[in-house]
């Protein structure tokens, strides 16, 4: 029994070390308390963003329009990790360099496909596999952008592999696709929650 407990302890310690190593170099984009480090895309827009319990929430009621939330810092080559939860039929997006949208859509019940489905590089490339989770479930993303190539892992499944994207995909901050850019969260379409957003710059 003692040997078994020691084995479990060793496995747990090894897992913790592996997790720590996997997260090495990542810095938080969101502090879990407020929107320090972010600003509204339109200063006079309707701010529908709130923070509660370590979660950043955008609540857009029917007939309302929120406003996008943009990082103060710009990034060139990076890996970004984040979790999001979106209600059924709600719509948002996570923008790399403020120009390339990774679509967020509550489409699990519809099994949507195409250039606008959950996980798509919006208006550019559909995901290789449909791996959306039901509305109300947290979904995980790891997106890497190096040069003009994008790799995305959604819910543990690689859905874009070094996709070359030389153009902005819509609603972009600007069209300077070869320059560093901000991360921004789409806030004008629908309700969405974010947590555990962190980024690792690559050299």
Image (cartoon, helix red, strand yellow):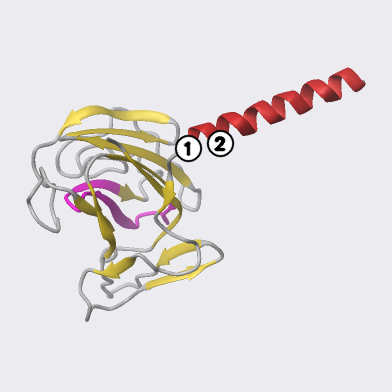
In the displayed orientation, state which residue is furthest to the bottom.
44
Which residue is denoted by mark 2 in the rendering?
20
Cα–Cα span, label 2 and label 1:
6 Å
Is disc 1 placed on a helix, strand or loop?
Answer: loop
Above or below, 132 against 59 in this view is above
Is disc 2 placed on a helix, strand or loop?
Answer: helix
* Label 2 crowd (10 A; few <14 / some 14-19 / many >=20): few
Q: Position of residue 68 (x, y in %)?
A: 26, 65
**Quadrant where the N terminus is found in the figure:** top right
Q: Position of residue 74 (x, y in %)?
A: 23, 54
Residue at image x 28%, y 78%?
46
Along the horizontal axis of the image, is 55 left or right of 6?
Answer: left
* Label 1 crowd (10 A; few <14 / some 14-19 / many >=20): few
Q: Nearer the viewer, residue 194 or 10?
A: 10
Residue at image x 74%, y 24%?
10
Q: Image quarter for residue 86?
A: bottom left
Q: Nearer the viewer, residue 130 or 162?
A: 162
Which contiguous range is marked in magenta?
A: 84-103
One can see residue 186 in this view: no
Above or below, 201 against 5 in this view is below
Instruction: Judge whether residue 11 is colored magenta.
Output: no
Instruction: Judge whether residue 94 is colored magenta.
Output: yes
**Quadrant where the C terminus is found in the figure:** top left
Q: Position of residue 26 (x, y in %)?
A: 43, 43
Find out whether the residues at labels 2 and 1 contact each other: C-beta distance under 8 Å: yes
Q: Position of residue 136 (x, y in %)?
A: 50, 53
Q: Image quarter for residue 12?
A: top right
One can see residue 21 in this view: yes
- Report the disc number at residue 24: 1
């Amino acid at each position: 029994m003692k040997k078994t407990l020691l084995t479990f302890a060793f496995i747990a310690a090894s897992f913790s070390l592996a997790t720590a190593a996997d997260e090495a170099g990542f810095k938080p984009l969101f502090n879990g308390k407020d929107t320090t480090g972010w600003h509204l895309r339109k200063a006079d827009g309707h701010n529908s963003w709130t923070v509660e319990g370590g979660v950043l929430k955008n609540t857009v009621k029917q007939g309302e329009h929120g406003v996008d939330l943009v990082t103060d810092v710009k990034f060139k080559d990076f890996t970004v990790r984040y979790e999001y939860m979106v209600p059924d039929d709600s719509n948002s997006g996570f923008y790399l360099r403020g120009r390339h949208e990774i679509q967020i859509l509550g489409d699990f019940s519809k099994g949507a496909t195409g250039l606008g489905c959950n996980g798509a590089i919006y208006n550019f490339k559909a995901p290789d596999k449909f791996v959306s989770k039901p509305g109300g479930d947290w979904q995980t993303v790891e997106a890497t952008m190096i040069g003009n190539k994008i790799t995305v892992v959604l819910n543990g499944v690689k859905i874009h592999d070094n996709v070359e994207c030389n153009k902005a995909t819509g609603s972009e901050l600007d069209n300077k696709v070869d320059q560093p850019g901000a991360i921004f969260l789409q806030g004008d379409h629908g309700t969405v929650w974010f947590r555990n957003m962190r980024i690792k710059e690559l050299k």
